[in-house]
Image (cartoon, helix red, strand yellow):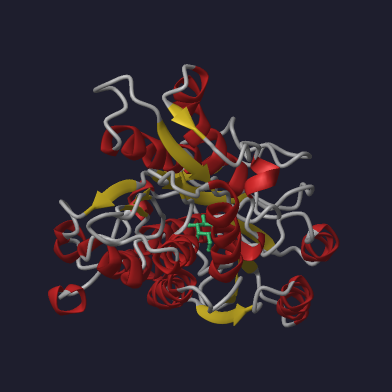
């Protein structure tokens, strides 16, 4: 049984180094002070179940968390599921069998973990849903993510401004892409974007020539850039003969790259036919370079180091039987439970503020040159 450690608000310190210092201080107090402060989770292993190495962001999420949990005194077991649900379930099962006390899971399919998380519960393992909400189970303690609805609003607001929709009554053409249907974030991104775009569809300032305006017509299985490229090829050849596409709502950089490849093959990217305004998400290096080159126009930066920090803080609280800090306890209903969340703020990035990524130390100036 775990023994309770009193809550220390200063655990919410920002840097991993400070966290280490603090934990060391707690240990000293335990030895020297009158009250017993156990090391609780310290020394135990945290299972980090990430979805895929196909995208740079998850590689960074995994390594940031491993580094920061280790700095806070934990061992880590980092696994990638290769975007295959059965791999991820087997990896989580294995983590439970190995006795890991905490799991941090970025689900491949948010609805596919009910059984395995029941096993986690039975074994007393705590669970943090990371970036993507795990659905259909009460056996998830906390959710660490970004404000997903805001991501969609940032993308759509960028499109409205870049197209100058408020400047004249002209009609612009747009095509819409959504993320993977098995990822709970997909509908938050979509709904956020639609809240902003809806009025322009209604008064005709934005037109989707394909007519594919419902989310289930626009989803991209496993966020796959190749699938997006094929769909974009198809949309161009079927619906855009002499008419140019002015904008594409893309929810993720990997999808944007596929969209831009299709556009390039169809003759976009010239003076006569410039690229449409294409959005994105994750500030992946290839897309930042594409933004600097003027191909993609926008992305949404979600600092994976900060999300990792949040997961460490939450995990540390859970392992000490304390209440983690939350800033949203109403919006993330997984069908069985409203999962208390801590949501970070996403930031819109375009060619005018890519410097921010260097200033924040996310990339070096050389990487962007
Ligand atoms: C989402 C995540 C996005 C993007 C996408 C594809 O769940 O929130 O930031 O990474 O997956 O990996």
Residue appearing at x 36%, y 58% in the figure: 306
Q: Position of residue 63 (x, y in %)?
A: 43, 78
Give the quadrant of residue 302. bottom left
Q: Position of residue 89 (x, y in %)?
A: 77, 72
Image quadrant occupied by the C terminus: bottom left
Q: In this view, which residue lies farthest toward the top?
A: 203
Residue appearing at x 40%, y 50% in the figure: 8
Of 188 and 39, which appears nearest the observer? 188
Q: Position of residue 41 (x, y in %)?
A: 56, 69
Decide: is 29 above or below 193. Answer: below
**Going by the image, does 346 lie left or right of 40?**
left
Decide: is 184 above or below 92. Answer: above
**Going by the image, does 50 lie left or right of 277?**
right
Residue appearing at x 75%, y 81% in the figure: 94
Give the quadrant of residue 299. bottom left
Does the image show residue 20?
no
Decide: is 26 above or below 240. Answer: below
Residue appearing at x 34%, y 72% in the figure: 286
Image quadrant occupied by the N terminus: bottom right
């Amino acid at each position: 049984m775990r023994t309770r450690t009193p809550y220390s608000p200063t655990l919410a310190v920002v840097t991993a180094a400070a966290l280490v210092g603090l934990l060391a201080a707690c240990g000293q107090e335990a030895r020297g002070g009158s009250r017993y402060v156990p090391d609780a989770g310290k020394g135990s292993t945290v299972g980090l179940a990430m979805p895929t190495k196909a995208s740079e962001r998850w590689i960074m999420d995994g390594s940031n968390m491993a580094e920061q949990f280790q700095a806070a005194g934990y061992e880590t077991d980092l696994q990638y599921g290769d975007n295959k649900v059965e791999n991820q379930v087997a990896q989580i099962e294995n983590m439970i069998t190995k006795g890991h006390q905490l799991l941090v899971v970025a689900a491949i399919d948010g609805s596919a973990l009910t059984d395995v998380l029941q096993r986690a519960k039975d074994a007393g393992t705590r669970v943090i849903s990371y970036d993507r909400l795990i659905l259909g189970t009460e056996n998830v303690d906390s959710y660490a993510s970004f404000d997903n609805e805001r991501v969609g609003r940032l993308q759509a607001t960028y499109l409205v401004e870049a197209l100058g929709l408020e400047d004249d009554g002209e009609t612009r053409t747009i095509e819409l892409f959504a993320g993977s249907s098995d990822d709970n974030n997909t509908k938050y991104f979509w709904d956020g974007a639609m809240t902003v775009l809806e009025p322009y569809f209604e008064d005709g300032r934005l037109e989707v020539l394909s007519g594919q305006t419902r989310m289930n017509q626009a989803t991209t299985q496993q966020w796959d850039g190749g699938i997006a490229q094929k769909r974009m090829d198809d949309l161009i050849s079927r619906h855009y003969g002499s008419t140019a596409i002015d904008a594409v709502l893309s929810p993720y950089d990997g999808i944007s790259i596929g969209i831009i490849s299709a556009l390039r093959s169809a003759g976009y990217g010239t003076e006569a036919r410039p690229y449409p305004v294409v959005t994105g998400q994750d500030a992946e290096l290839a897309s930042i370079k594409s933004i600097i080159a003027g191909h993609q126009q926008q992305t949404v930066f979600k600092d994976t180091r900060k999300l990792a920090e949040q997961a460490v803080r939450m995990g540390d609280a859970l392992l000490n039987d304390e209440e983690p800090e939350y800033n949203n306890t109403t919006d993330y209903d997984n069908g069985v439970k409203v999962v208390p969340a801590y949501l970070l703020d996403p930031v819109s990035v375009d060619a005018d503020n890519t410097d921010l990524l260097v200033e924040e130390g996310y990339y070096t100036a050389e990487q962007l040159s």
